[in-house]
Image (tube, rainbow, N blue to C red):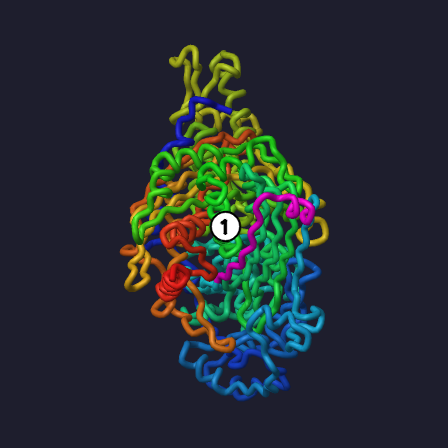
Amino acid sequence: MKDDLNIVGKRVVRSDSLAKVTGRARYTADLKFPNMLVAKVLRSPLPHARILGIDLTAALKVPGVKAAISGFDTYGVKWGVFRYTQDHDMLPTDKVRYIGEDVAAVAAVDEETALEALSRIQVDYEPLPAVFEPNEAMQEGAPQIHDAYKNNINVHVHINVGDVDKAMSEAFLVREDTFKAAGEAYAMMEPYAVVASYANGFLDLWMPNAGPHVRAKALSNLLKMPLNRVRVRHINSGGAFGGRSEVSPGDLVASLLSIKAGRPVRLALSREENATSTRQVHDMIATVKTGMSKDGAIMAKDYRVIYDGGAYSSTGPIATSIPFYVYEECYRFPNVRYNGYRVFTNKGIRGMYGCHGRAFIAGNEAQMDLMGKELGMDPVDIRLKNGLTSGEVTATQSKITSCGLAETIATASERTNFKEKWTKTSKGKGIGMGCIAIMCGFPMGFRSGSSCYVKMNDDGQATLVTGLVDNGQGNESMVIQVASEILGIPMEDVNLVNADTEATNLDPGAYSQAAAFVGANAVRIACENARKKIVAIAAEKLGVKEADIDLRDRMAFSRKTPGKNMRISWVVREAFFRGDPIVATGTYFPSIDFEREWVSRPWGQMAGTFSFGTSVAEVRIDGQTGKITVPHFTAAHDCGRPINPMAVEGQMEGSIQQAGIATIMEENLWNKGFLLNPDLLEYKVPLACDMPEIETIIVSSIDPEGPFGAKEGGLTIRMNAYSAIACAVANATGTLFSELPLTPDRVLNILERKKGAKK
């Protein structure tokens, strides 16, 4: 690894910034093709009902309608991330399971015609009893949503390490609390859209997605088309946050309509449809029991967590596991038992999220603060006492190879004067700390690794070809920066071909926090292999040893005698003359246990490495209204080595907005399966006026495997920002919360309970 880095580690403007801030960047709904049709979807008005029949005849008679479909036009293939969770008919033929579920669709020459056609589709329903709360859905006699899952239990993840009961009986202090968190909307700025164009047996698709290769494979299966005839193309994405990790019913709808009509079809969801009919965030109820020794060491943890999974499996096994794993990757658990249940309800489908596990993680952190206080320890010391360090192994047998957790705790504490503020809270003011770790690249079978192809063009510029995808994190700019560093050419000389399934090799996508650690590592290796070829020719032409050659500013030169130099473009042309163009490939697989499985075998090396972080939030509470404001927020993040510190800071700031301030305002509101706040008028997201003063601190642990020492950058703060604010509120009120988010009404209830307890 080079120590004298030229551009990696420097604050650079992202390569995609100009197009996005000027409005020139194109998103799916911007695409226009000749003869393109408009698609609209008919959705279920009922939360649970048997489908007795669907009649499209009248819709097809509307002038301008070119195609109409229902589930009876599909191949009956059910979608599921795993073979044992394939339960989702993208267009159902048996019954509907939530309000807003896709039932039928039309493609017409314009939106008005499509809407008229929808109104003429006849669907005969037989209403069925519905269930909306997971605790009720698990009871004997509850309405059965899927016949294959007894008591509507979709997934049960059971982990048992050590002897929990014995350790609890021997613990000096034991506490048990239950925490509840409402589900949230992803609230991407870009409502979901998909364009499908079918011609000559080939299907081209554009849509926001977190993994184009995963999406193409899913559609290949659903449509029973050869994989090489399904092409997912590159397009900008207006946000994902975990909600666009899987194939969507809209993808199948647009594809089928295009196949039937023989014309391009665009389906663009409304803001309300985006909320009701795409993935949402799990509600959860977490019961946390902890046993500690007299010196504050965690002796045992016992968990029972119930997740509201909505109507279908989605990422069920992963979603049920991740909250536990990100916590066990942070703290030492010699004895731990985890029972996670994902339960079906007659509500919209739930997926992954950048702050998944809110009730679980915030509950753990706040409970630890109270137990530490009872033992005479502050939040800083009790976290340092129990935090993992480099070389240790997690409860489920993952080795921590690099770890800056202690440094993030110490730095955030010092910058905020945490200890003094925590012990000397004034009325209505509080401070809280949250810590977490995040895996970088978990097992996804043969898609766990990434491959990159790089070629040097005859003008000395480079083209990278990689499956890596960018959902706004800056992944595209990141790999261009890596290539620029290694090849010695400026970023503007690097062209990128990515996220196109026909042109690129497999890549995990913007999923499992693998873009930097896995995707950029493949780019690094490919560029290093190309560099070796450039150096060999340059050394020969300049008459020096290869070890003496460096590449920088489009030049190959001798380190000892800089006057001996030549343009990299000359080297590239020489290679062409020799009939051996400078091209190279690179592949990287993280060192993970490929036998590890979410349900059947939850142990072994989870990831190639782990990133760590600490957030500190300061809050003020208005005792009259219960409103919380956050004047200051500090985040310290061990991301290995930041490839672009400015981009990492941006991700940290976005995480504080998305997951931190969300602690006091964001939640989905329901009435018997009907979403009451499906738009951004009624669903409250943080605005500029809600944001705190933010201080970001980057801790560089320099991971031995990461590209230039890099790890995941940003998501760690998203996971612990929620906890920091929740713990600050507990500190300010002197009372443990039980329900999240901490909206004014709930805060007033906490304050009233505290008054009642004093009386």
Query: In x, y percent, where is residue 392?
Result: 61, 33
**Amino acid type at image mark 1:** Gln
Magenta segment: does it hold 176? yes
Q: Can residue 453 be seen in this view?
A: no
Query: In x, y percent, where is residue 158?
Result: 68, 54
State the residue position of label 1.
Answer: 367
Displayed quadrant of residue 644: top left
Q: Which residue is at a point 38% across and 38% down the rendered structure image?
A: 419
Of the pair 348 and 524, the residue shown nearer to us:
348
Please indicate whether residue 452 sits to the left or right of residue 564 in the image.
right
Query: In x, y percent, where is residue 408?
Result: 44, 36
Query: In the image as oriented, which residue stretches furthest toward the front?
Result: 759
Of the pair 702 and 227, the residue shown nearer to us:
702
Part of the protein shown in magenta: 164-181
Q: Is mark 1 on a helix, strand or loop?
A: helix
Query: In x, y percent, where is residue 191?
Result: 42, 64
